[in-house]
Image: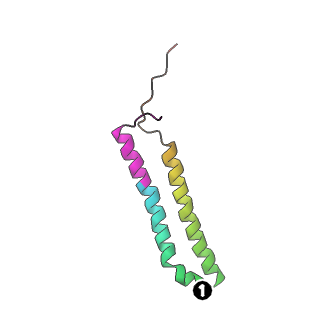
Amino acid sequence: MAKPRTKLARAALISNGMVWFGLSLMLFAIAAEQTYAAFTGEWFNVLGWALIVAVAAGLAVVGVIENRNIRAGKRYKPRPRR
């Protein structure tokens, strides 16, 4: 089981998640707004829409990976001295 995090580390995790997932959500919202225009236009409009969706999904994945790997403020036992 993981060791408990400090209050500062918990705040860092929450703010980091808000940044990554907020940006991802914003891009998903832009893609959702442009869905009709993309699919009634030319092929490159669909390509641009797919690129926006792919970037938004990639940002969500990066946010998850970063929150899993963040180590700020975690309590560790001191390293034994020789």
Q: Locate residue 56, reporting x and y percent.
A: 53, 64
What is the three-letter code of the residue carrying label 1? Gly
Residue drawn at x 63%, y 75% is 47
**Residue 10: quarter of image:** top left
User: Who's the residue at 50% across and 75% down the image?
Assistant: 32
Highlighted range, magenta:
1-17
The residue beneath circle 1 is 41
Q: Is residue 58 above or below residue 64?
A: below
**Residue beneath the point at 39% across and 46% down:** 12
Residue 45 location, quadrant:
bottom right
Residue 48 is situated, as x and y percent measured from the top left of the image, at: 60, 75
The answer to whether residue 82 is above or below residue 46 is: above
Q: Is residue 81 within the magenta segment?
A: no
- The residue at the far left in this view is 7
Using the image, determine if residue 11 lies above or below residue 39: above
Q: Percent position (x, y) of residue 71?
A: 47, 39
